[in-house]
Amino acid sequence: MAVEHFDVLIVGAGLSGIGAGYHLQANAPKKTYAILEGREAIGGTWDLFRYPGIRSDSDMYTLGYSFKPWRGAKAIADGPSILKYVRDTAVENGIDRHIRFGHQVKRASWSSADARWTVEVERGPGKDLAQLTCNFLFMCSGYYDYAEGYTPDFAGTDQFPGPILHPQKWPEGLDYSGKKVVVIGSGATAVTLVPEMAKTAAHVVMLQRSPTYVVSRPAEDASANWLREHLPAKLAYGITRWRNVLFGMLFFNMARKKPEQTKQRILGMVREHLGPDYDVDRHFTPSYNPWDQRLCLVPDADLFEAIKDGKASVVTDHIDSFTAKGLKLKSGEELAADIIVTATGLKMQLLSGMEVVVDGERIDLSKTVSYKGMMYSGVPNLASAFGYTNASWTLKCDLTCEYVCRLLNHMDRTGLKQATPQKNPAVDEAPWLDFSSGYVQRGIGQFPRQGLKKPWKLNQNYALDLLSLRFGAVTDDAMEFSKPKAPAREAVSA
């Protein structure tokens, strides 16, 4: 049976994969494509995570696609609304007809002689092996392991009789009403879970080793809703999107230039919410500067309100061990619990763990250098969609999709088949992400490096990326274009 071939294979049918399908249809409409999705549903993260209160930690005017206005009333949207938005985008544009569900990509092998990838997948419940080929491979599979989250090796877990849950695998129908709950962690997931579970639980404790910066923001954007009522949807969306992008960039730059001033401003807002008697220094004052890790966003101060109402509390301490009644802490304090939630982070994973082979040589991607934050030195015709750590995921993914289409169109116009970033050895290198978050530090070793000069530098800046990816030249000294030579025919002796 002939191997099925596409111009482009997209891996992942989540937020970025559906966006990639749209951009291909809009900007490179002659290209054939398919989307390979390992699971059985559209949505990626927004379909996988089902824990109570699941929501965005970015505003939907920047997390939403550039081409599809967000029409919901809430700027900080709940997970089901975001999932519907992604699925509606797929259906409205016929992208869903290109998705192959139950196709888990395991290996991709590039042949320079043929200028194509051979992609090996496990298909269906029986994990039958199959192959597809493509000229360009676009990875939109995120940055973490979908199979399991990260849970530290806590002592005594076998002693605790109740459920120990990781938010990535939340059981359907779990009844926590009237129960004592401890949520271990202080990141975005923990600050989402705690106020939501506190609505019906007897009490919820957020147990953290160290604090995180927490910022409150209105769930609804009043000015955005006013603009939508009085202007065409696309214009209103564009104005709000740019306002939020510019404000985000301004706040990030201020945090970098004046970290102490920014820190005191954030902590001052927390004190306003919790009152003068609350120990903000202990529970909400991190040891690092703002934006050394991602800030946690809480809509309408819901976490602070739950604390003030006595429905939730924060304990800052280290775990000694699990016990039959809950948790014993290093301080000697014991926390009683019926349910313990380990909101302890993700396991980072590059390209869904896919093996990459170029002309018979297996590539260690951690030894490569990232080109424009999306391609890999020495690896042809392969790009990845990654979002920002200091802004919305989709802002960068939209630009990446636009650039990939520009690259494909350039190769079509010039008759070239292969685009390979080739790093200059003189360019100094640095870690791909300069972020102190635990999940980043645990997994960064498997990711590529970045250079300290463009086009190898990871900007984390929407304005710079906009100039580079949407308006900048596709050709530069680092990108090597080529066309495969047909193999020479061997002489046949008489």
Image: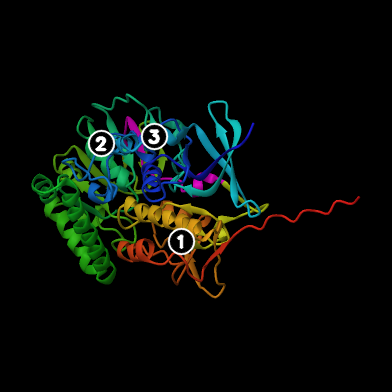
164 lies left or right of 238: right
x, y percentage for residue 101?
Answer: 47, 32
Q: What amino acid is at disc 2?
A: Ser
Which mark's residue is nearer the viewer, 3 or 2?
Answer: 3
Q: Residue 367 appears in which quarter of the rendering?
A: bottom right
Query: Badge 3: few (under 14), some or many (20 or more) residues near its Cα, within 10 Å?
Result: some
Secondary structure under badge 3?
helix
Examine the rendering and report whether any part of residue 232 can be seen: yes
| Mark 3 or mark 2: whose residue is earlier in sequence | 2
Please provide the residue range marked out in magenta.
335-354
x, y percentage for residue 399?
Answer: 36, 56
**What residue does disc 3 label?**
96
Examine the rendering and report whether any part of residue 166 can be seen: no
As drawn, the residue found furthest toward the bottom would be 426
**What residue does disc 1 label?**
432
CA separation, marks 2 and 1? 32 Å
Name the residue rendered at 66%, 58% in the picture.
485
